[in-house]
Amino acid sequence: KVAEKKLAKVPDQIEAAEFYFKVSWLYMSLRQNAVSLNYARDAMNIYKMHDGYEKKLAISQVVMGTNYMQMQRFKDAEK
């Protein structure tokens, strides 16, 4: 929560996306999948708006798929 409040003061969207991605990965590792999905979506929304971040976007999609697999939501994982 503290980091998120400080992040709001950071003007660089890519820095925010990196934060969201890393937090998403952490929550995925802890099997807090619903929380991880929210952060992954936030990261993806930012990456989609910037050229040159296709690899980060793809990795974020893998995180999304992994979360869905862990939740046994296999149809969602295929998307």
Image (cartoon, helix red, strand yellow):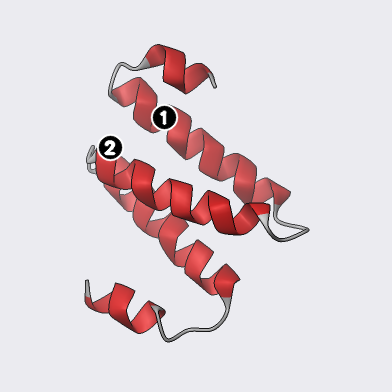
Which quadrant would the C terminus be assigned to in this image? top right
Q: Name the kind of residue labelled 2 in the image.
A: Asn
Which quadrant would the N terminus be assigned to in this image? bottom left
In this view, 20 is above or below 70: below
Whole-percent x and y of residue 12? 57, 79
Rate crowding at label 1 as few (under 14), some (14 to 19) or many (20 or more) other CA atoms within 10 Å: many
Q: What is the number of the mark on residue 33?
A: 2
Please name the residue that numbered disc 1 is placed on.
Answer: 66
Closer to the camera, 7 or 63?
A: 7
* Quadrant in the picture for residue 23: bottom left
Q: Name the kind of residue labelled 1 in the image.
A: Thr
Most extreme residue toward the right, as rendered?
A: 51
Whole-percent x and y of residue 65? 46, 28
Closer to the camera, 78 or 26?
A: 78
Left or right relative to 44: residue 39: left
In this view, 14 is above or below 73: below
Give me the residue at 42% from left, 60% from top. 20
Give me the residue at 36% from left, 47% from top. 38
